[in-house]
């Protein structure tokens, strides 16, 4: 009976595999305008789809067969389950490495989901996905250079090291020296990314949905939306013509939605060009969307409203992680936000300068940065930098981005954060060198609108001060619902509800010991359906904030073997101040402003009390040794 059921399961997956292989290949060929690309996709995509299906079927079969008949809660079942988790994690790791690209991204993300994914998956993915990504050959690198800049690297640079110093999911980095002697880092996009990204995304979606239909308890459908949000995708331009939305697909640049198309009809003729016809279908005009934020229409009058992308007729700007020019602009905007909105720490946060004349959508040339990765504590200490100072700076920088700027770096894993001594040479009271945080990889940012930013800041303020009503109110506003707000708070803090509402000053501190990890895994297993429903329900912007939160927690764990009171004090301070600042903007009457002023005074008293408690706790720890 059991064997027959399992064979039926494998049969279902085999049917799905056949559909994927044939349908995927046909769709790829049909949508390709480049014969060379079509040939590449016809040979590569079916193989990748086959690997996906076999791996998914193998993992599903292993769980069903290995755990069959073992009593829930028994020691034997727990032992066997641990072994299956390890085997399955390694199978998934192997699949990610073989397919590369967005699969590496997927593996990196799974490595942060300790509140949902079994620990065996988390550890396997964390150990491998950040620094063991596949590498493009030098010939492939030269191919990108020729397409983008017209010459090979050895002609463009005085020196160019063909061996990359780092390789990530979307690109790899080479060290070079310009003709004027500047040492630079050159980020080169992997050649296969633009060819297979769309097919890979669709494949993951079909497999997740298929597994859910076969095994209803396996519900990772929420992950599909997150992949769409955080992984590379083609740019789309959507314009309304005579009340009908028309969609244009571009290889790069921005998404523009034109609400008033001036009565013209547009037809796509190539990835970055389209033809505009008059009302009477008289003369046709070619409009081009070039790299950057402007559109040039080759007509002499002002009838076309696409003269400037970003004016009042354009909205919904969407940037792609595969466009390195967007990444370069993000880095500059990030630093500008710190200078304007957070000048008190602007000098402690840095991003490499961009060499714009040597950068394109697939090549990014930046100032080379020396320093220690944020998880390399030994190198940090050799540089005279204290890990706890770094943890404090990381927490403050990202708190400022989330609660004040509303423009957030959403991929802050250890490989994207470098620490170096502050160039000014400033030192701490103990004579240690002050750290400067260098942010790398600015491809994935998310903008929080005013309401979301206010509610998210208010939620963290409530979490820090154990305000149960505030936690519920703001969790509901952010989309968790009245039934799952406590679970949402638990995922954000990695603490059970009774600890979240505990008034003690260290109620949110994560110890990072085996007991806590075991407790988290128990809760993840116990509440898996509710967690899946919550993640499906939350807006995508909040899912990305969760991902950012997970990455920062992992960084803190490397630096402090857990978390510290200082990091939560900083989060509480910045989020509370952001809430007060937002209320000041909203309140217009004298009475309402006085109300905010009183709230601000009370907040300062509470923060002072928290700071004193922090000092006393440190003193007690120092005395007890």
Image: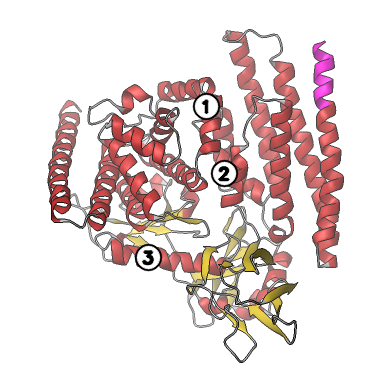
Of mark 1 and mark 2, the one earlier in the sequence is: 2
Which part of the image, by quadrant, shows the C terminus? top left
**Residue 342's image quarter?**
bottom left
Q: CA distance from mark 1 to mark 2?
A: 23 Å
* 418 displayed left or right of 94: left
**Residue 532's image quarter?**
top right
Q: Secondary structure at mark 1?
A: helix
How many residues crowd around disc 2 within 10 Å: few (fewer than 14), some, or many (20 or more)?
Answer: many
Q: Which residue is mark 1?
A: 530
Which residue sits at x=84%, y=32%?
14
Residue 82 spot, x, y in % from top left: 60, 21
Whether the residues at callouts 3 and 1 have beta carbons within 8 Å, the answer is no
Which residue sits at x=17%, y=51%?
592
Residue 7 lies within the magenta run: yes
Residue 333 spot, x, y in % from top left: 41, 66
Of mark 3 and mark 1, the one earlier in the sequence is: 3
Q: Secondary structure at mark 2?
A: helix
Residue 477 spot, x, y in % from top left: 40, 41
Of mark 3 and mark 2, the one earlier in the sequence is: 2
Q: Which residue is mark 3?
A: 335
How many residues crowd around disc 3 within 10 Å: few (fewer than 14), some, or many (20 or more)?
Answer: some
Q: CA distance from mark 3 to mark 1?
A: 39 Å
Please give the label number shown on residue 108: 2
The label nearer to you, 1 versus 2, is: 1
Query: The magenta stretch spans which residues?
Result: 1-10
Which residue sits at x=18%, y=37%?
610
């Amino acid at each position: 009976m059991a064997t027959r059921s399992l064979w039926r399961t494998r049969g279902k997956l085999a049917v799905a595999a056949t559909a994927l292989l044939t349908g995927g290949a046909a769709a790829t060929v049909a949508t390709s305008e480049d014969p060379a690309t079509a040939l590449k996709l016809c040979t590569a995509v079916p193989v990748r789809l086959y690997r996906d299906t076999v791996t998914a079927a193998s993992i599903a079969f292993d769980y069903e067969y290995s755990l069959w008949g073992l009593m829930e809660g028994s020691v034997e079942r727990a032992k066997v389950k641990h072994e299956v988790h390890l085997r399955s994690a390694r199978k998934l790791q192997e699949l990610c490495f073989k397919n590369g690209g967005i699969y590496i991204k997927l593996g990196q993300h799974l490595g942060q989901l300790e509140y949902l994914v079994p620990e065996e998956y988390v550890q396997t993915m964390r150990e491998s996905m950040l620094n063991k990504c596949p590498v493009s050959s030098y010939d492939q690198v030269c191919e990108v250079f020729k397409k983008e800049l017209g010459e090979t690297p050895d002609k463009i640079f005085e020196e160019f090291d063909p061996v990359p110093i780092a390789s990530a999911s979307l690109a790899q980095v080479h060290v070079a020296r310009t003709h004027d002697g500047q040492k630079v880092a050159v980020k080169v996009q992997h050649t296969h990314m633009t060819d297979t990204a769309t097919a890979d995304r669709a494949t993951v979606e079909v497999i997740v949905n298929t597994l859910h239909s076969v095994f209803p308890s396996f519900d990772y459908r929420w992950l599909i939306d997150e992949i769409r949000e955080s992984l590379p995708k083609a740019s789309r331009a959507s314009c309304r013509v005579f009340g009908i939305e028309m969609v244009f697909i571009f290889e790069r640049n921005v998404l523009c939605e034109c609400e008033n198309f001036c009565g013209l009809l547009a037809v796509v003729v190539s990835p970055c060009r389209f033809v505009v016809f008059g009302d009477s279908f008289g003369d046709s005009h070619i409009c081009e969307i070039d790299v950057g934020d402007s559109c040039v229409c080759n007509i002499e009058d002002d009838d076309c409203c696409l003269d400037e992308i970003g004016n009042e007729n354009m909205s919904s700007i969407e940037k792609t992680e595969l466009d390195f020019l967007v990444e370069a602009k993000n880095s500059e905007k990030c630093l500008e936000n710190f200078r304007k909105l957070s000048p008190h720490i602007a000098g402690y946060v840095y991003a490499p300068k961009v060499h714009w004349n040597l950068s394109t959508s697939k090549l990014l040339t930046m100032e080379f940065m020396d320093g220690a990765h944020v998880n390399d504590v030994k190198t940090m200490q050799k540089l005279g930098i204290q890990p706890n100072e770094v943890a404090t700076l990381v927490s403050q920088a990202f708190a400022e981005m989330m609660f004040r700027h509303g423009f957030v770096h959403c991929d802050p894993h250890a490989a994207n954060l470098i620490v170096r001594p502050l160039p000014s040479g400033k030192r701490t009271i103990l004579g240690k060198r002050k750290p400067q945080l260098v942010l790398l990889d600015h491809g994935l940012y998310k903008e929080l609108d005013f309401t979301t930013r206010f509610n998210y800041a208010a939620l963290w303020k409530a979490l820090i001060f154990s305000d149960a009503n505030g936690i519920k109110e703001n969790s509901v506003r952010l989309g968790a619902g009245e039934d799952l707000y406590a679970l949402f708070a638990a995922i954000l803090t990695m603490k059970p509800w009774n600890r979240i509402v505990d008034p003690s000053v260290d109620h949110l501190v994560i110890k990072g010991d085996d007991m806590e990890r075991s407790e988290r895994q128990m809760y993840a297993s116990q509440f898996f359906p509710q967690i899946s429903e919550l993640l499906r329900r939350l807006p995508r912007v909040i899912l990305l904030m969760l991902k950012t939160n997970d990455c920062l927690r992992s960084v803190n764990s490397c630096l402090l073997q857990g978390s510290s009171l200082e990091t939560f004090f900083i989060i509480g301070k910045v989020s509370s101040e952001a809430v007060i600042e937002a209320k000041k903007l909203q309140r217009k009457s004298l009475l309402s402003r006085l109300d905010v002023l009183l709230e601000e005074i009370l907040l300062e008293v509470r923060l002072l009390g928290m700071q004193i408690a922090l000092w006393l706790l440190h003193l007690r720890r120092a005395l007890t040794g």
